[in-house]
């Protein structure tokens, strides 16, 4: 499912191609690209739920998040999100790329991904997807893009 999300993000967002909103057409295109129909369905539901998260009134845990609060992870989150990933999310909060609300959106979407525990690279892409879809986070999105794509200049020692 994550491969489909990456494909959609890179195809439509990164290339500025208009996203097809017709679910059938999108499903057909993804099938032609070689993805399985059950995985396509899961990925489209994941995207729809991400869109729903924008309305925090419908999600009380998002409405209750406060700046400068400390996030405690439950056991299932600890299994899915390792120390490195949790540390990276904390770093993103400290540099104001993630707010408490967008952090919760990221955690919500991560917990819906199937498969192995999350890698740091996967987390970075989830953060990009969340920030891209969360209105008012354009600056944070561009900061995150810079963190991912910026190549260090000069010699590395």
Image: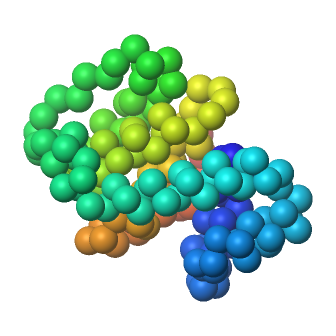
Query: Farthest residue toward the top?
Result: 75
Q: Position of residue 113 (x, y in %)?
A: 57, 38
Q: Is residue 132 above or below residue 21?
A: above
Q: How many marks?
A: 0
Q: In the picture, which quadrant includes the C terminus? A: top right
* Quarter holding residue 72: top left
- Name the colouring of the figure: rainbow
Q: In this view, does 31 lie above or below 107?
A: below
- Relative to the observer, which residue lies in front, 6 or 51? 51
Query: Farthest residue toward the front?
Result: 24
In the rendered structure, the answer to whether residue 130 lies left or right of residue 113 reads left
In the rendered structure, the answer to whether residue 43 lies left or right of residue 28 reads left
Q: Position of residue 143 (x, y in %)?
A: 38, 63
Residue beneath the point at 79% across and 53% down: 37
Residue beneath the point at 45% across and 54% down: 49
Q: Can residue 36 be seen in this view?
A: yes
Q: Position of residue 38 (x, y in %)?
A: 75, 47
Residue beneath the point at 17% across and 29% down: 70
Q: Where is residue 17 in the image (x, y as percent from the top left)?
A: 64, 84
Q: Is residue 144 visible?
A: no
Residue beneath the point at 66% across and 30% down: 115
């Amino acid at each position: 499912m994550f491969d489909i999300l990456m494909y959609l993000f890179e195809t439509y967002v990164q290339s500025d191609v208009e996203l097809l909103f017709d679910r059938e057409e999108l499903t057909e295109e993804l099938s032609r690209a070689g993805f399985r129909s059950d995985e396509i369905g899961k990925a489209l539901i994941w995207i729809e739920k991400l869109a729903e998260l924008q309305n925090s009134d419908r999600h009380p845990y998002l409405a209750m998040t406060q700046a400068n609060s400390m996030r405690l992870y439950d056991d299932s989150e600890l299994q899915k999100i390792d120390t490195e990933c949790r540390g990276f999310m904390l770093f993103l909060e400290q540099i104001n790329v993630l707010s408490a609300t967008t952090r919760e959106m990221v955690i919500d979407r991560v917990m819906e991904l199937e498969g192995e525990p999350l890698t740091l690279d996967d987390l970075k892409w989830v953060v990009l997807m969340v920030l891209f879809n969360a209105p008012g986070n354009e600056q944070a999105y561009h900061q995150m893009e810079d963190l991912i794509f910026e190549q260090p200049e000069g010699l590395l020692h």
